[in-house]
Image (cartoon, grey):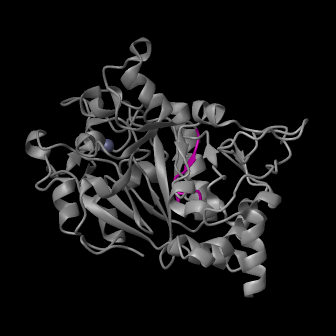
């Protein structure tokens, strides 16, 4: 880019602290979604008939400001403020993927005109030497090159101490009945307790939170934070704590991650928090940081594309509980991996579409198994049944990770 172009651009924009007040361009209102509009600190009125999101309305209707917003990017973006109504933060780089142009993201639509203008502003940033990281990403986008895909890895964490093999055909005793059709007579299966760490670029997610330290004989020998420390990570580094469902062997350590955004099926969250829907099976004890407020929770209805790029997706698979989810992870070398949650507890149950008596709903479970198996086939995914010891070896032994 030549100096002449830069000079002209900066003069026209009043960049780097000179006279910035100009009439605001506004963007056409989409019929279904509110518009991603520029918000002026100066309060200019847009031309009549056009849409505009006022700062007040934006604050009122949105949960979060884009993380690489005007403050991070400095004066070149001083009059641009994008806000999303969704509870999930997006970096500017994520939002500015060319594929997002015209696509609804939360309440936001990035129109081409806005996208092109932001691309132009990288010149301003170049001229005054700010936002080096954002500049690199935006420049790559502006040149039509796809931004480097974030590295995704998957690591298994031991989240409980295994008992002796379980008689999954038992009809009495502890009341565990893993089949509501009197199947598996005499079958004993070694069950284990698994959590997972997912690295997505610089972000981390923990999937399921196992038993807690107070769980007696099945308590984990090391907590998840103790395992993370071996990877030079702390709970504060974990952006999301995702829960397949609310049973005690999946949520025992969730309260060790109060700074993380809790992702949990809406049906499960409602049973934990709504007295009218309470279920004795749903114990809110470890969810206090989110129930009291102060910690962020996102009840998930339907599926949830966690990082908005298809690499980590919570899939709605009700039946074991109302809000049960499994997790799909896309790895560059290993391909797709499906983590079962408790959609099935062991291989024989999975293979025969068996349904435990303690599930919330037999029919929902069958529907979820059908969906899960079709996804596994279509994506040629590695299926990992989280409780089945025979599936532990499908991932490298901790601290190694699948890539
Ligand atoms: Zn379980």
Spot the residue most to the front. Answer: 19
Spot the residue most to the top. Answer: 276
Percent position of residue 325, x then y: 47, 44
Of 213 and 131, the residue lying toward us: 131
Q: For ligand 1, which image quadrant applies?
A: top left
Query: Is residue 276 at all visible to an observer of this figure?
Result: yes
Viewed as shown, does residue 81 lie left or right of 98? left
Of 308 and 126, the residue lying toward us: 126
Which residue is depicted at the point 10% across and 55% down?
Answer: 221
Viewed as shown, does residue 395 lie left or right of 47? left
Q: Which residues are the magenta region?
A: 302-312
Image height check: is 339 above or below 200?
Answer: above
Which residue is depicted at the point 26% across and 46% down?
Answer: 186
Count numbered badges in the picture: 0
Of 247 and 51, the residue lying toward us: 51
Image height check: is 121 above or below 266?
Answer: below
Image height check: is 345 above or below 228?
Answer: above
Viewed as shown, does residue 44 lie left or right of 361? right
Q: In which quarter of the image is residue 391?
A: bottom left
Image height check: is 194 above or below 86?
Answer: below
Which residue is depicted at the point 39% across and 13% down?
Answer: 275
Q: Quadrant of residue 156?
A: bottom left
Q: In which quarter of the image is residue 61?
A: top right
Percent position of residue 264, x then y: 43, 39
Percent position of residue 85, x then y: 61, 39
Q: Does the magenta stretch include residue 305?
A: yes
Q: Does the magenta stretch include residue 255?
A: no
Look at the image and tell me in which quarter the N terminus lies: bottom right
Percent position of residue 3, x then y: 72, 86
């Amino acid at each position: 880019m030549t100096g002449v172009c830069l000079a002209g651009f900066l003069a026209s924009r009043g960049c780097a602290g000179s006279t910035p007040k100009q009439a605001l361009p506004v963007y056409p209102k989409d019929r279904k979604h509110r518009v991603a509009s520029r918000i002026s600190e100066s309060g200019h009125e847009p031309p009549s008939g056009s849409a505009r999101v006022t700062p007040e309305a934006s604050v009122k209707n949105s949960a979060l400001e884009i993380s690489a917003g005007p403050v991070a990017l400095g004066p070149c973006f001083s009059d641009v403020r994008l806000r999303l109504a969704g509870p999930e933060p997006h970096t500017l780089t994520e939002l500015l993927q060319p594929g997002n142009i015209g696509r609804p993201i939360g309440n936001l639509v990035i129109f081409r005109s806005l996208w092109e203008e932001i691309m132009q502003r990288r010149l301003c940033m170049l001229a005054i030497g700010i936002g080096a990281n954002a500049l690199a990403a935006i420049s790559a986008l502006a040149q039509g090159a796809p931004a480097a895909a974030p590295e995704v890895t998957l690591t298994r964490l031991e989240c409980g101490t295994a008992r002796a093999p379980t008689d999954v055909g038992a009809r009495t005793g502890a009341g565990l009945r893993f089949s509501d059709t009197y199947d598996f007579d005499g079958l004993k299966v070694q069950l284990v307790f698994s959590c997972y760490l997912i690295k997505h670029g610089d972000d981390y997610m923990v999937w399921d939170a196992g038993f807690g330290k107070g769980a007696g004989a099945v308590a984990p020998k090391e907590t998840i934070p103790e395992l993370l420390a071996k990877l030079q990570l702390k709970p504060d580094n974990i952006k999301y704590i995702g829960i397949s469902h609310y049973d005690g062997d999946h949520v025992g350590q969730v309260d060790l991650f109060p700074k993380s955004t809790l992702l949990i099926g809406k049906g499960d969250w409602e049973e934990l928090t709504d007295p009218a829907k309470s279920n004795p099976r749903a114990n809110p004890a470890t969810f206090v940081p989110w129930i009291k407020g102060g910690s962020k929770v996102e009840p998930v209805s339907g599926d949830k594309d966690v990082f908005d790029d298809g690499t980590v997706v919570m899939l709605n698979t009700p039946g074991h509980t109302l809000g049960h989810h499994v997790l799909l992870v896309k790895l560059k070398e290993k391909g797709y991996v499906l983590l079962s949650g408790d959609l099935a507890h062991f291989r024989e149950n999975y293979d025969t579409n068996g349904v435990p008596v303690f599930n919330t709903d037999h029919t929902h479970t069958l529907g979820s198994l059908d969906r899960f198996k079709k996804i596994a086939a279509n994506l040629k995914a590695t299926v990992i049944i989280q409780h089945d010891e025979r599936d532990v070896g499908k991932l490298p032994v901790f601290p190694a990770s699948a890539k």
